[in-house]
Image (cartoon, helix red, strand yellow):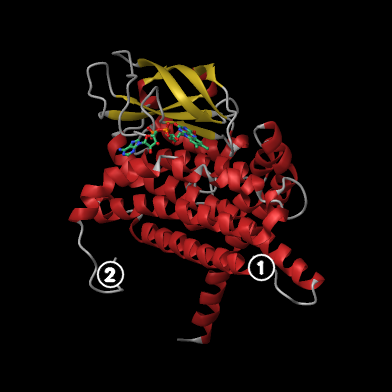
Amino acid sequence: MTAHNVQRQDQDAIAAMKPVADLASRVEAVAKIAAAEAASVDREARFPTAAIKAARESRLLGLAVPREFGGEALALTDIADACYRLGQACAATGMVFAMHHSAAACVVRHAGASAWHKDLIRRIAEEQLLFASSTTEGQNGGNVRASAAPIEGNGADITLTRAATVISYGAEADVIATTARRADDAPSSDQVLATFVKSDYVLEPLSGWNALGMRGAASAGFMLKACGKREQIVPEPYERIHAQTMQPVSHLLWASVWAGIAADAVARAQGFIRKAARQSGGTLPPGAAHFTKARSTLQTLRGLVASSLARFEAIADDRAALASLDFQTAITLTKVDASELAVATVLSAMRASGLAGYRNDGEFTLGRHLRDILSAPIMINNDRILANVSMSALMSGIPTSLRSE
Ligand SMILES: Cc1cc2nc3c(=O)[nH]c(=O)nc-3n(C[C@H](O)[C@H](O)[C@H](O)COP(=O)(O)OP(=O)(O)OC[C@H]3O[C@@H](n4cnc5c(N)ncnc54)[C@H](O)[C@@H]3O)c2cc1C
């Protein structure tokens, strides 16, 4: 290799790294704002207005938009890393950011030739539109692969009236991506994903959001009444969008936020243990073993998220591989395992910190972290997921080498 080639390669590498380095400082600035309002967001169960405003100003909402549409075309791993950092600062901010990117990814990756959606993708980057998603409906719980309300209308104009049990930050969003039954005579599993911008819909309140944790996600229930054009339905069937994008991307980004919450809990516990050791002439407090346990489960959690991200990135454009039984099983189990590990980590951090972690005040308090992280196993209930994948888990082969997936 010539010196010129080496120099050229270095320049290319630096050019490729630059947006990511720039991303880290932009995310850091937003994380500081998110951390400053985290306690009041939680106390008042309010949307993290300042943090999301800062995310918009730092142009973080269009990170995944392709360059041809004015975005930065960043990889999912970069966005997941931002989720991790924001999750450390404020769980609700991290989760809003993760949910926005999951819903936006469905449009970016499945718009196909749709001119309407191409324009919407351009607007995500240009106007920093905030996406919310509506999959939970009526009494259907976390069964996201079935819809009750149909798309109505036979011609170019469509309507949708949907009892949306939970739409996180529905009132603050600019766009709602919602599942729906394809038509009045379609079975519940024949779903589409429709995108409605704010001027297309009204949200009539059905229920508030006074929850144990993730209080700033502002996940109220609404009757969603939307009208629009047929072209606002994403061209591909939801079944494919779900398998190739919605499920893997949301599970990976949620898991990144949970890992961030867990990491901050571990950092607080570390601060407590160090302080206690200093005050007692270097003797570790009795809870120190729980801190070691918290570090260990955090390490496992981070490894799980990183390896699952790498697995997704390797096949991100391979539709058949994404749809394979092995990948689908692995990605749903990643959600289950990541949520359980995150809860275990925060619990260990709390036990390591004793009263200092248990109380709701003071620099080592972990009450908010614990309440926030308990949402992880129920955000698409782990029991439901385990029941759904039990057959595919039984059918997929057990790897015979550490190198195979
Ligand atoms: C913080 C947060 C934000 C959210 N944001 C949104 C949002 O923006 N948009 C949206 O659409 N939804 C959202 N949701 C809803 C979420 O995605 C799930 O749909 C919802 O949490 C499931 O509710 P559920 O527990 O009542 O339902 P279910 O999944 O029906 O679970 C109810 C109970 O039934 C059990 N159960 C269900 N099925 C089985 C089974 N097959 N085997 C064994 N046990 C089973 C579960 O263990 C559980 O105890 C959010 C949820 C949370 C916690």
Q: In this view, does 123 lie to the left or right of 369?
A: left
Residue position for label 2? 404
Q: Regarding ligand 1, which quadrant of the image does it lie in?
A: top left
Along the line of sight, the residue nearer the viewer: 114 or 207: 207
- Looking at the image, which is closer to me, 42 or 201? 42
Quadrant of res 22 = bottom right
Quadrant where the image shows the C terminus:
bottom left
Image x and y of residue 377, in percent: 45, 45
Residue furthest to the front: 286
Residue drawn where x is 79% and y is 72% of the image: 278
Residue under label 1: 286
- Residue in front for this viewpoint, 305 or 110: 305
Q: Do the residues labelled 2 and 1 touch (CB within 8 Å)?
A: no
Residue 197 lies, with reference to residue 341, above or below; the image says above
Q: Say whether disc 2 or disc 1 marks the residue closer to the N-terminus.
A: 1
Q: Where is residue 151 in the image (x, y as percent from the top left)?
A: 33, 19
From this view, report whether residue 112 is shown above or below residue 21.
Answer: above
Q: Quadrant of the N terminus?
A: bottom left
